[in-house]
Image: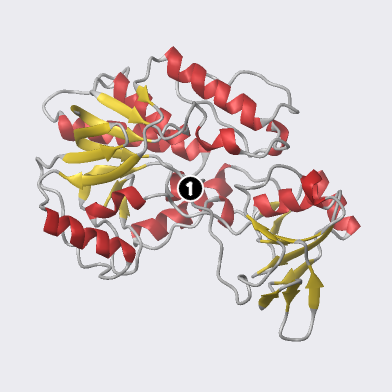
Amino acid sequence: MSRDVEVVVIGAGQAGLSAAHHLARLGLDLVVLDAEERAGGAWQHRWPSLTLARTHHVHDLPGLPFPPAGDDVPAADAVPAYFADYERHFALPVHRPVRVRAVRRASDDSRGEHRSERCERGADRGAESGRRARPDERFRVETTDGQWTASAVVNATGTWTRPFVPRYPGQEVFRGRQLTPVDYRGAAEFAGQSVVVVGGGASAVQLLGEIAEVADTTWVTRRPPVWREEPFGPDEGRAAVALVEDAVREGRSPGSVVGVTGLVVTPWVREARARGVLDRLPVFDRLTPDGVAWDDGRFVRADAVLWATGFRAALGHLAPLGLRGPGGGIRMEGTHVAGEPRVHLVGYGPSASTVGANRAGRGAAVALRRLLHPDTAIPRSAA
């Protein structure tokens, strides 16, 4: 079965819902394809102990405020309920569960498709980067529920499905458990154990604090953590976003906005510092069957290693488009891929935050409305 729309939105998290809302208000024909079983994006998979009080602020989606909820309510309950209400309130055309297998140019022959796929895997990276869409280009979106054709694609698949684990010698011989934040369900399962937490981001610090209540913990990071004692205001936020914008404009890996802001010193952080929980060690050189070791002879026994080492953008289904450049990154101009004004990545790079995702969704929708309907004015109430 093949269906035709103006815009396919892939993913129904914060960025995808924002984009869908603005696209609908601007009168574009769209569909939202979401791989999840229910509304909520990645939020539905967060660990149960992550309450609203412990999250980064969840910003309102456009047109419908986030309802008041107690600080002790699990984010995995509150945010998905809000997203489900949002979809119903605006009657957004969300289809789920639908997994997008590939996005291709409708004009590509099979030979060109195979070249693009090899390019994505790194065999010939950059060879396809000169291929750019024609003004009337259309896309074929292949899914687990048939095929769609569209004039434009807004990708909002986030990073949750692609936790990053760096390679270290000995990982294959370590007899304990290795996990990422995606696998974490609570500290109780580590009671009485020795746990090594790897990573210098907010998730690592948060999970370290929980596990340290019931287990012996060791914190290791590649670089010393940068602590932010002063409040984080709008100016600091804009400066952090600008650093990530520079990266994607140049086609480099975007990293995360949170990664360039530093770690905020909260009352819990001060207390954890006093207890020695946040006494950090440089990252180990290898894993052994029973723990982790450094070349200087230091050794820490471990029952588990938690790799809180970040995430990568889930963009594998876009491989046939050959978007990556010679360095492996995707060069961006605002929310769209450079030279590809019909392919927008929202919730990517500088928009990988709740407030940034909202802005990116609106920006992508306005740009596509102007591109696909250049002869009609955008109503002021919708813009």
The reply to whether residue 306 is in sight is no
Identify the secondary structure beneath mark 1: loop
Q: Please tell me in which quadrant of the rendered image residue 3 appears.
A: top left
Is residue 257 shown left or right of residue 226?
left
Q: State the residue at coordinates (20%, 32%).
A: 370
Image quarter in which the N terminus is found? top left
Q: Which residue is mark 1?
A: 159
Q: State the residue at coordinates (65%, 72%).
A: 173
| Image x and y of residue 166, in percent | 56, 67
Which color scheme did the rendering employ for the protein? Answer: secondary structure
**Which residue in the rendered view is the most extreme toward the right?**
275
| Image x and y of residue 156, in percent | 39, 39
Q: Please tell me in which quadrant of the rendered image residue 227 appears.
A: bottom right
Image quarter in which the C terminus is found? top left
Q: Residues within 10 Å of mark 1 (few under 14, many from 20)?
A: some
Is 127 located above or below residue 93 in the figure?
Answer: below
Q: State the residue at coordinates (35%, 65%).
A: 328
Is 382 located above or below residue 309 in the figure?
Answer: above
Q: Please tell me in which quadrant of the rendered image residue 215 appears.
A: bottom right
Towards the viewer: 1 or 234: 1
